[in-house]
Image (cartoon, rainbow, N blue to C red):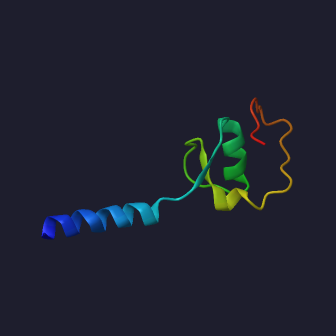
Amino acid sequence: MKKLLLITTFIIIAISTKSQTTAIPDANVEQALINLGYDSGITDRTVPAANTSTITTLVVQNKNISDLPL
């Protein structure tokens, strides 16, 4: 019974801490988002969706971007 409770608790914690992310196919786009403060850390091709939902304008010229998610 204790083992089942422990597993259930772990599953609930794992589900509740999972964040929704936006896939970023181009590492240069993600680096631009990191530089602008919308993401942090290393380029892992994802950005928290909550951080990108408010972006209305993104200046991307001269950033060597080949794939811009829309």
Outermost residue, top direction? 66
In the image, taking residue 69 as reference, residue 45 lies left or right, namely left
Give the camera-side residue of 37 and 23: 23
Q: Which quadrant is home to the C terminus?
A: top right
Picture coordinates of residue 12, whole percent (x, y): 36, 66
Q: Is residue 12 above or below residue 26?
A: below
Q: Residue at position x 84%, y 35% from top?
A: 62
Q: Is residue 27 visible?
A: yes
Q: Is residue 54 above or below residue 22?
A: below
Picture coordinates of residue 17, whole percent (x, y): 45, 64
Q: Residue at position x 55%, y 42% from top?
A: 44
In the image, taking residue 33 as reference, residue 41 lies left or right, namely left
In the image, taking residue 57 as reference, residue 43 lies left or right, namely left
Q: Is residue 51 above or below residue 2?
A: above
Q: Quadrant of residue 4?
A: bottom left
Across the whole image, how many numbered discs are drawn on residues?
0
Q: Is residue 37 visible?
A: no
Q: Residue at position x 71%, y 56% from top?
A: 52
Picture coordinates of residue 63, whole percent (x, y): 79, 37
Give the camera-side residue of 21 and 7: 7
Q: Which quadrant is home to the N terminus?
A: bottom left
In the image, taking residue 6 as reference, residue 27 lies left or right, namely right
Picture coordinates of residue 11, whole percent (x, y): 33, 61
Q: Residue at position x 71%, y 50% from top?
A: 33
